[in-house]
Amino acid sequence: MGAYDYDLFVIGGGSGGVRAGRVAASLGKRVAVAEEYRFGGTCVIRGCVPKKLFVYASQFHEHFEDAAGYGWQVGTPTFDWKALIAAKDKEIARLEGLYRRGLDTNGAEIIDSRAELVDAHTVRIVATGKTVTAERIIIATGGAPNPHAALPGHELCISSNEAFDLPQLPRSILIAGGGYIAVEFANIFHGLGVQVTLIYRGKEILSRFDHDMRQGLHKAMVDKGIRILLTDVIENVAQVEGAGGGLIATTKNGETIAVDTIMLALGRDPNTRGLGLEAAGVAMDERGAIIVDAYSRTNVPSIWALGDVTNRVQLTPVAIHEAMCFIDTEYRGKPTTPDHDLIATAVFSQPEIGTVGLSEEDAAKRYAEIEVYRAEFRPMKATLSGRAEKTIMKLVVDAASRKVLGAHILGHDAGEMVQLLGISLKAGVTKDDFDRTMAVHPTASEELVTMYQPSYRVKNGERV
């Protein structure tokens, strides 16, 4: 037996922590993984998995409407919120079971408790008060919604966490935020029949995305009936007195908005409070994120940090990738740093956005001349349904090398398409490679390989 109780102790049972713990245990290491809530973390329990299930649920009202154009006669549909919640809970429980089973079958010890650092090698199990030691410790506690505590009445609002378990579907909702969580939930609730208002302080939603994507989505959302208020913020939230209940929000621009529910989607903070990081000497930045080097090491040699708690790239696959790099570096003798370049991502709005690489704006700042290939068209599915929607596809290309710098899609299944585009861009694909590729017809994605002439060029930051 070694000098420590464990070779590896993981604090946090989300995707990154479980992957590191499970694989380390499969290599014969003595591993414990502690989780204070439920195994699976943000993604599985209260994030991307239940969110995607809600997205599917919210799309059916359009499917029913579209069916008539294809000869189907569908009766008046009804929606049961409680049935959706029950089905979602069943699936989340199944997935949590898989996470726990993976740890158990590989020999890792599961600790259902909060764990806090005592020093560089010691952890206290809060549920029992017991302290244990470990040669290596991983912090993988993820992030949590910013409660926006400075907002008067913030305690009356919900975050994305509570949105998955509301006792009943609200008739109206005000969502504060302009990032992907706010946008996705605006579309989800609208699709389920809720009157939705989105309020955002910026000039455009999804400000970090390519301008064609954010502007195209904005128009699609407004056309569906979602109200979007820009350059405005909530300044006060108050409870409505009387039998009707509800909330009243007052905005900086003088709007008074009465709704059943207000959701704050104003960013996420690293979940580091009360973990004992100060006692162990672990350095954090001003937001509370754990500072790590290229190998996910903290300033304390025995402690690593993975995933959202480091505030590098807040995506589940990134946390898993960082976990595998830790395994390769520490237990397989293959020092490996996480590759955070060219990460494909999707916004599961309606329509979806899929994006990888540089936006047109960012590419124009970095390259002397770029070519922009852009197609906007009505998808084939919408022709018989009569739905007025558009798909936008866009390639951003370095004019000198012909290398594809960015690929962006707004439309059905954009997330599925961009995964494959991510592989291509990672491999250094050129526009000539796209041009040599035969189209699959009839598909929306064939537009990606049939845009032979640039729509326009941008030289030294100016369109020409």
Image (spheres, rainbow, N blue to C red):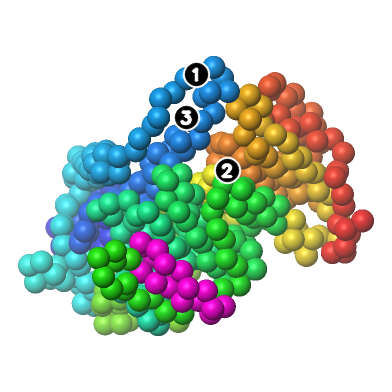
The disc at residue 299 is: none
Residue holding disc 2 = 351
Residue 178 position, x and y percent, is: 54, 63
Pair 2/3: label in front: 3
Residue holding disc 3 = 64
Residue at 44% across / 23% down in the picture?
Answer: 74
Which residue is the extreme one toward the top? 71
Badge 1 density bin: few <14, some 14–19, many ≥20, Cα 10 Å: few
User: Eyeballing the image, is 384 above or below 199?
Assistant: above
Task: Work out whether mark 1 precedes mark 2 in sequence or the reverse, and give the earlier one.
Answer: 1
In space, the residues marked 1 and 3 are separated at their CA atoms by 9 Å
Is 345 covered by the magenta stretch? no
* Of residues 209 and 2, the one drawn nearer to the viewer in this rendering: 209
Pair 1/2: label in front: 1
Quarter of the image for residue 137 reads bottom left
User: Eyeballing the image, is 60 above or below 74?
Assistant: below
Residue type at mark 3: give it: Phe
Left or right, 33 with respect to 320, comes to left
Residue at 46% across / 69% down in the picture?
Answer: 257
Q: Main secondary structure of the magenta part?
A: strand
Left or right, 309 with respect to 402, comes to left
Residue 1 position, x and y percent, is: 14, 58
Q: Are marks 1 and 2 in contact (CB under 8 Å)?
A: no
Residue 24 position, x and y percent, is: 29, 50
Residue type at mark 1: give it: Trp
Boundaries of the magenta span: 247-266
Left or right, 186 with respect to 245, comes to right
In space, the residues marked 2 and 3 are separated at their CA atoms by 17 Å
